Image (cartoon, grey):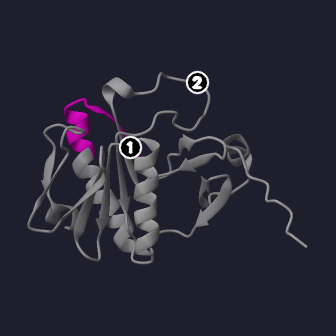
């Protein structure tokens, strides 16, 4: 006997769930909960948030969003993801809205920090999902390898460049003028 079809949650149903502080995302209508991240993830995410955030604020380039911020990136089935760091350029910011809501604008830049407990295939799948949703650039930061993969969508698919500690990460046309030594991200 076939299993009954699963009920896929909408973003609105997801928002109403009593998750009691659990880290969770809605992926194609299915609830995914995650344990707290490990030390390497938290420290690296904070360092890069400070480095990038200071530059974005000083130059009034747009807004930065923290890891718990949900972005509604697809409907039918609904997907609400929460990157480790997100940036939206000033000219693309959503209009102020009085009620709580998921961010309705796809970020320009998303940062995913790979925790030592993450499976590489899942991290790559997450980067691809962001690009498919319209994000222009995804940085996958790997504390264990001390590398940053820069993912960009282009006419021929996706390009990926891996930067090592002795190299420099820059914001290209997404965060103009931003650059930092990769080594600075890892301390």
82 displayed left or right of 136: right
Q: What residue occupies the far right of the structure in this picture? A: 1
Q: What residue sits right under mark 2 in the picture?
A: 98
Element under disc 1? loop
Asked whether residue 38 is in view, the answer is no
The front one of 72 and 95 is 72
Q: Is residue 167 above or below residue 134?
A: below
Element under disc 2? loop
97 displayed left or right of 61: right
Across and down, in percent, residue 113 comes to 36, 63
146 displayed left or right of 4: left
The front one of 88 and 128 is 128
Residue at 53% across / 51% down in the picture?
Answer: 81
Question: Dividing the image into 4 quarters, which one contains the C terminus?
Answer: bottom left
Question: Dividing the image into 4 quarters, which one contains the N terminus?
Answer: bottom right
Crowdedness near tag 1: few (<14), some (14–19) or many (≥20) residues, C-alpha within 10 Å: many
How far apart are the alpha carbons under marks 2 and 1?
25 Å
Q: Which stretch did the figure color magenta?
A: 53-66
Across and down, in percent, residue 185 comes to 21, 62
Residue at 39% across / 77% down in the picture?
Answer: 116
Across and down, in percent, residue 114 comes to 38, 68
Residue at 13% across / 48% down in the picture?
Answer: 179
Q: Which mark is residue 135?
A: 1
Query: Who comes first in sequence, dot 2 or dot 1?
Result: 2
Residue at 38% across / 45% down in the picture?
Answer: 86
Q: Nearer the viewer, mark 2 or mark 1?
A: 1
Q: Which mark is residue 24?
A: none
Instruction: Please say whether residue 60 is one of the residues in the magenta stretch.
Output: yes
């Amino acid at each position: 006997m076939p299993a009954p079809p699963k009920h896929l949650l909408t973003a609105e149903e997801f928002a109403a769930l009593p998750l009691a502080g659990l880290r969770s995302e809605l992926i194609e209508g299915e609830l995914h909960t995650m344990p707290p991240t490990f030390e390497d993830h938290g420290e690296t995410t904070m360092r890069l948030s400070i480095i990038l955030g200071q530059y974005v604020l000083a130059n009034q380039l747009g807004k930065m969003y923290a890891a718990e911020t949900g972005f509604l990136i697809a409907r039918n089935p609904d997907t609400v993801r929460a990157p480790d760091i997100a940036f939206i350029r000033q000219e693309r910011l959503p209009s102020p809205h009085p009620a709580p809501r998921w961010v309705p604008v796809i970020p320009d830049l998303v940062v995913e920090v790979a925790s030592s407990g993450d499976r590489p295939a899942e991290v790559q799948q997450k980067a691809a999902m962001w690009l498919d949703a319209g994000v222009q650039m995804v940085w996958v930061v790997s504390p264990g390898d001390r590398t940053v993969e820069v993912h960009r969508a282009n006419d021929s698919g996706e390009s990926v460049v891996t930067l090592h500690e002795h190299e420099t990460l820059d914001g290209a046309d997404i965060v103009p003028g931003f650059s930092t030594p990769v080594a600075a991200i890892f301390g």
